[in-house]
Image (cartoon, grey):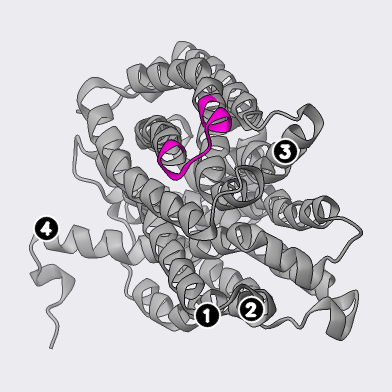
Amino acid sequence: MHPSPSTLSPGHSKAAAVFRVTAGNFLEQFDFFLFGFYATQIASVFFPASSEFASLMMTFAVFGAGFLMRPLGAIVLGAYIDDVGRRKGLIVTLSIMASGTILIAFVPGYATIGLLAPALVLVGRLLQGFSAGAELGGVSVYLAEMATPGRKGFFTSWQSASQQVAIVVAAGLGFALNQSLTATAIAAWGWRVPFLVGCMIVPFIFMLRRNLEETQEFKARQHRPTMSEVFRTLVQNWTVVIAGMMLVAMTTASFYLITVYAPTFGKTVLHLSTADSLLVTLCVAISNFVWLPIGGALSDKIGRRPLLVGMTMLAIATAYPALSLLAHAPSFLNMLLALLWLSFMYGIYNGAMIVALTEVMPAQVRVAGFSLAYSLATAVFGGFTPAISTALIHMTDDKAAPGYWMSFAAACALFATFALYRRRAATLTPAH
């Protein structure tokens, strides 16, 4: 018989709560990574075209389309979570996310059902995007609200850290398949296996979410805003939401560059082996997992602003040179070193950024505001990073061109950091 939460030690109870709430994040990133890694196989099965470039661009466009649904999901589901509570809302987002996952895993190819195949894949991605719009915000706010005093940065960083576990598991599965199946078998049906694994873990995640407790901060609220009140408050605070979107730009662009796009970059641009590309991505995910809590904990000690400013300036100065060195001497070691450097900047920055974004949003619309800012950034900067990177390389004939995109996103984040801390210094002052 398991002890009730009230009989657990505070550390054990909080660790269990972190595990339960971040499990859904695991599923979301697991599926997103798989779609990016198996982009060439998905392109062949669902989006056959006259050239590999056109086929791959259509695939990444559908991948990016899911992110266009995130702002809508952030507003609708985010407002719902701010109204009914974190626990109930996160169960709803998981249900919608699981529906999209199952759909993509079982859709027959273009050769079998024609245009219906890419259409159904698109529907699956739109469902995933709609749910993810509020999932990240709901999880981040839950972690911030249940954190012990003075450790909000550390606790909130586990939202992103859980995603890195998903990358490690997905990359490990991909590596195992690559070692045990032929390239023909992977292209024909093997790429679906990891998606099926994702479907199999859905019931387990539902069980974890059902045992989640509501946060004390939400329970203590005297007034629960209605959906219309949430929408009205968001409109009144639109400048904070836009600045928050720019703050997230560095996170989304760098994350999708070094994880989702990295395997395709390694295989199709650098012409490294599939195994090498997967191993690099796996190492990057482990690196992210290490740096994110460090970034969150450091932000609790020295403040959010120094880390946000320092990492964005470092990214502006070094993102392109790091990829340029890799492009001129492509190898497993050089790809690993370049992406581990980008991983360091991403991890420290995002560890501080997530908690900063929860602090700047008005409390009554904290989930909706966080989710909308994050989703807009993911739609504008992150989700289309694979497509933009592919297009930049194609147009400029420069294999390091994705570095320009990461530097641009970092510049946007630097501007937002100065703007937010100047206008809302009191709101953004970290608790110690």
Asked if marks 4 and 2 touch (Cβ < 8 Å), the reply is: no
Q: Residues within 10 Å of mark 1 (few under 14, many from 20)?
A: some
Residue at 29 percent of width and 36 percent of height: 296
Q: Is residue 327 magenta?
A: yes
Judged from the image, the secondary structure of the residue bearing numbered disc 1 is helix
Stretch in magenta? 325-334
Q: Nearer the viewer, residue 227 or 139?
A: 139
- In the rendered image, which residue does mark 4 sit on? 10
- In the rendered image, which residue does mark 1 sit on? 199
Which quarter of the rendered picture does the C terminus lie within? top left
Q: CA distance from mark 4 to mark 3?
A: 46 Å
The nearer-to-camera label among 4 and 3 is 3
Q: Is residue 131 left or right of residue 51?
A: left
Q: Is residue 350 magenta?
A: no
Asked if marks 2 and 1 touch (Cβ < 8 Å), the reply is: yes
Q: Which one is earlier in the sequence, the residue at label 4 or at label 3?
A: 4
Horizontal and vertical percent position of residue 426? 37, 18
Horizontal and vertical percent position of residue 82? 50, 53
- In the rendered image, which residue does mark 2 sit on? 105
Q: Which one is earlier in the sequence, the residue at label 4 or at label 1?
A: 4
Q: Is residue 426 above or below residue 102?
A: above
Judged from the image, the secondary structure of the residue bearing numbered disc 2 is helix
- In the rendered image, which residue does mark 3 sit on? 388
Q: Which one is earlier in the sequence, the residue at label 1 or at label 3?
A: 1
Q: CA distance from mark 1 to mark 3?
A: 30 Å
